[in-house]
Amino acid sequence: MEQEQTRFTTSHWGAFGVTTRADRIVAIKPFPADPEPSDIARNVPSAVHHRARIDQPYVRRGWLEKSSETSRGEDEYIPMAWDDALDLAAKEIERIISTHGNHSIFGGSYGWASAGRFHHAQSQVHRFLNCLGGYVSSYASYSTGAAQAIIPHVLGMNFHKITWGETNSWSQIDKHTDTLVMFGGINPKNAQVSMGGVTEHATTAWFERYATSGKRMISISPQQDDSPTQTDWWPIEPGTDTALMLALAYVLETEALADRSFLASHCTSYEEFLPYLLGKTDGTPKTPEWAATICDLPAEQIVTLARSMAQGRTLICVSWSLQRARHGEQPYWMACVLAAMLGQIGLPGGGIGFGYGAISNVGKTALRLRGPLFEQGRNPISDFIPVSRIADMLLNPNGTYDFNGERRTFSDIRLVYWCGGNPFHHHQDLNRLNRAWQEPETIIVHEPWWTATAKRADIVFPATTQFEREDIGWAKGDPYLFHMPQMIPPVGQARDDYAIFSDLCNRLGCAEEFTENRTADLWIKVIYDQFARNAKADGVAVPSWENLKQQNFVRLPIDSEETETIPYGEFRINPEANPLGTPSGKIEIFSERIASFGYTDVPGHPVFHKPNSDPAYPLRLLSPQPGDKLHSQLQAAIEDKEIHSTLLMHPVDADARNLVDGDEVRVTNAFGACVAKLATRSTIKPGVVALPTGAWFSPAQGEDDLSGNPNVLTEDCGTSRLGQGAAAHNVGVEVTGNVRNT
């Protein structure tokens, strides 16, 4: 019998042991120091060796034969030798650049493909395209697009700098916070993951500690499961959080609980916002009674909460999910205003926080070290799109659109080069994206599995998974440093992205620029050594690369509470000497800059927009992150166990439709339809249903998606003309017993 070997690695969902026998992964074991390890890793052995792995390069027949009779997603693929496929791709890239220029290339990647710092797909493809003369890029993320647009206008900082730097730690909350108000909740399910890795999952343990200390914790969400069990659940109507915040602000103002001194010294233009709050501009005072009918919450409960928020140290937390909807900028802006009215920004345990629970490392105290990074180089092409506007770009070449005060023009894209990520999982209105995907002349994809994106490519290169190559594992906010050993040989003819791009560069005349005459092994050592030098300069000693390889992993002494800083602490002490990056240097309750854009959907101060509704589709659909995978990763293994995703519905709504647990149901609206398996729970608000993302888009004839991907039902529109973020949440649907398409 072959000898088994177990070594540890890390991933976006945590560290775990990988047991191998011969050339196969046979088992997974938890990381000993992780108090609450994620179950996602259990899918690794079957996914890595799944029949859905791409075994060699393939080319779409219709593209190869220049036939228009078949479209992407419906064609057959011809297997091809590596050299032939690389020659074909290089020739096509060269043709596109010489004929249409680099402005016609879109470099697609979403950064979550691997936790490894060298084999980071986004860095690899962007460096490759930069060596060729550049590409049209994307800005922001599907998770935080609206926040990344609005927060710099209000707080004067890059949103991710706030997420990682100006955020109360879990320990600061423990010591100082009296009331934790969580708009959108703080979900341990989502906190399974963090960019680059999370080694010690601690969210649940912190909430257990908070409950023991008697801390008041309120979760405001349509789903009770959006926060730990120790919280008080307020089942709010989806899309109405801004109305609730306005009503809380109304109580603070009218009962003289607002901190007028802080508003005068650290904020601008509160008096410009006040007439809207009091109803003098639109005839509608934003009273608790007004909000109660909109939010479906008792008015007296709103009043009591506002008073208690003003009586002690209060931290307002806002989940990323709130800004993934139409007008998603508004709850983020209004949350900042509400926190400013309490006057606790800059005090430990008070103020505002974004993204707790969205990713696990938010709130952790580990020092943010620099690197390690595989540098992408400079992109000579300055053009970009907001990341979720890809279908708009492909369907409207040279069309115009508004974004953050600019009138921009979409590029005419002829080549899409995608490496890392699956847009046919996370984009909205997948049927529309499917139509848009037919527009480019050529699509090249690197992918380990036959995902919906790979099935819609013209040239498909089989890529390795993180278990088939060596790398460095490290993440912001995590004190662990990993050598990620190669666990098994590449499956089939898979190659890592660096090898593929190096071979293409050899054919395109830019090999030296891309590789700098270094192998992958040498690059890993080079970027690790630079990381070690940076760490030493920051006062942190890390082992040599050879020593780390021998140890497998090390826990660095970088997460002491003694090094914690108070978010906005220096600004609070002296706003003149430590101004924010806004035009005024202060918190902008009213933004002259935004007002100058003339956007009716985003005026100069936060406002409430009532969610769209259609009586034909009375149920409000939420599309949360899945609990059994990261995005759509490892879905091949999950589909072996569950054909369809699970739709969560309140028993009252199920009874009204004569549906029961386990039924196969059809979820429909004007954008599309999908099939799902029904689960009834009283932990979701009546009138609301939830269908997690992550299923591999599998449309049957008639465009019904058989996998249960909610993004066949979501609207492909921007959050607003300001942010143009993804507006996935809170669309109307109807649910019926399923009759399969034929």
Image (spheres, helix red, strand yellow):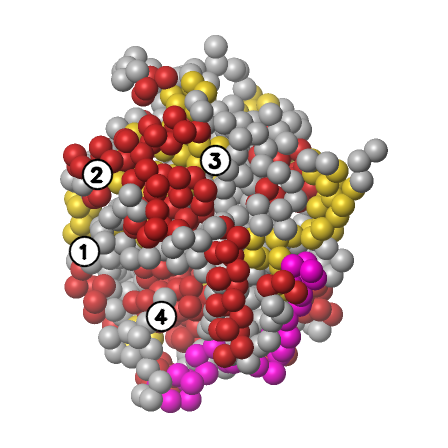
Residue corresponding to mark 1: 406
Location of residue 84 with respect to 33 vertically, above or below: above
Task: Decide which of tag 3 and tag 2 comes sooner along the chain.
Answer: 2
Q: Which mark is residue 97?
A: 2
Task: Decide which of tag 1 and tag 3 comes sooner along the chain.
Answer: 1
Tell me the distance, in whole angstroms, between the alpha carbons under discs 2 and 1.
Answer: 28 Å
| Residue 230 seen in the figure | no
Residue at (71% x, 69% y) in the render: 209
Judged left or right of residue 414, residue 640 is right
Which numbered mark, 4 or 2, is in the foreground of this view? 2
Task: Decide which of tag 4 and tag 1 comes sooner along the chain.
Answer: 4
Which numbered mark, 2 or 1, is in the foreground of this view? 2
Residue corresponding to mark 4: 157
Q: Position of residue 610 (x, y in %)?
A: 35, 49
Q: Which mark is residue 447?
A: 3
State the extent of the magenta-drawn residues as a range. Answer: 548-575
Callout 3 amino acid:
Glu
Callout 2 amino acid:
Ile
Callout 1 amino acid:
Glu
Task: Decide which of tag 3 and tag 4 comes sooner along the chain.
Answer: 4
Tell me the distance, in whole angstroms, between the alpha carbons under discs 1 and 3.
Answer: 35 Å
Tell me the distance, in whole angstroms, between the alpha carbons under discs 4 and 1.
Answer: 19 Å
> For residue 626, which quarter of the picture?
top right
Judging from the image, what secondary structure is the residue with disc 4 in? loop
Residue at (47% x, 50% y) in the render: 519
Tell me the distance, in whole angstroms, between the alpha carbons under discs 4 and 2.
Answer: 37 Å
Location of residue 70 with respect to 377 vertically, above or below: above
Callout 4 amino acid:
Met
